[in-house]
Image: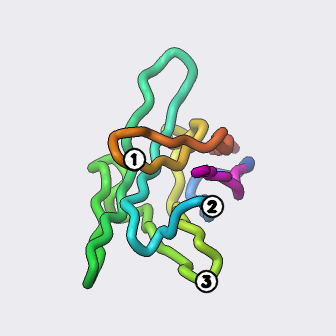
Amino acid sequence: QVQLVESGGGLVQPGGSLRLGCAASGIMIRFTNMGWYRQTPGAEREWVATVKSSSTTYYTEYADSVKGRFTVSRDYAKNTVYLQMNNLEPEDTAVYYCNTRIYGTDYWGKGTLVTVSS
């Protein structure tokens, strides 16, 4: 059974940093595309970043709104994907979700809240 558990959210001042984690079970992140999304109340869930894996390499993609500030990384030993968020802005305030799609089925974690405020 695929399970994703996010962690690392919290309150941070504008310009600050946070690192979110997504611990996966039931899959091996080394061979699985993993994504980060975020959602604010009343809004659609918004794609933030993706790390795509192949048998030989991987690459990352970022939404324009976070490009240059957010970085996705992976720890294979911990089977965990991270989202390093720097230079945070109030507009980054949202619940952040981890996602993967296996044979056409989307799996989501429960999310972790990030609040950027002074």
Q: Residue at x 36, y 57 (%)?
A: 50
* Secondary structure category for the residue under label 1: strand
* Secondary structure category for the residue under label 3: loop
User: Is 33 left or right of 113, judged from the image as shown?
Assistant: left
Q: Mark 3 highlights which residue?
A: 77
Q: Please name the amino acid that badge 1 sits on.
A: Arg
Which is in the foreground here, disc 3 or disc 2? 2
Q: Residue at x 55, y 66 (%)?
A: 82
Q: Nearer the viewer, residue 33 or 13?
A: 33
Label of residue 93 in the image: none
Q: Residue at x 36, y 64 (%)?
A: 51
Q: Quadrant of the C terminus?
A: top right
Q: Is residue 38 above or below residue 60?
A: above
Q: Please name the amino acid that badge 2 sits on.
A: Ser
Q: Nearer the viewer, residue 99 or 41?
A: 99
**Quadrant of res 109:** top right
Q: Please name the amino acid that badge 3 sits on.
A: Ala
**Residue 63 at x, y = what percent?**
30, 49
Give the Cα distance between marks 1 and 3: 21 Å
Q: Mark 2 highlights which residue?
A: 25
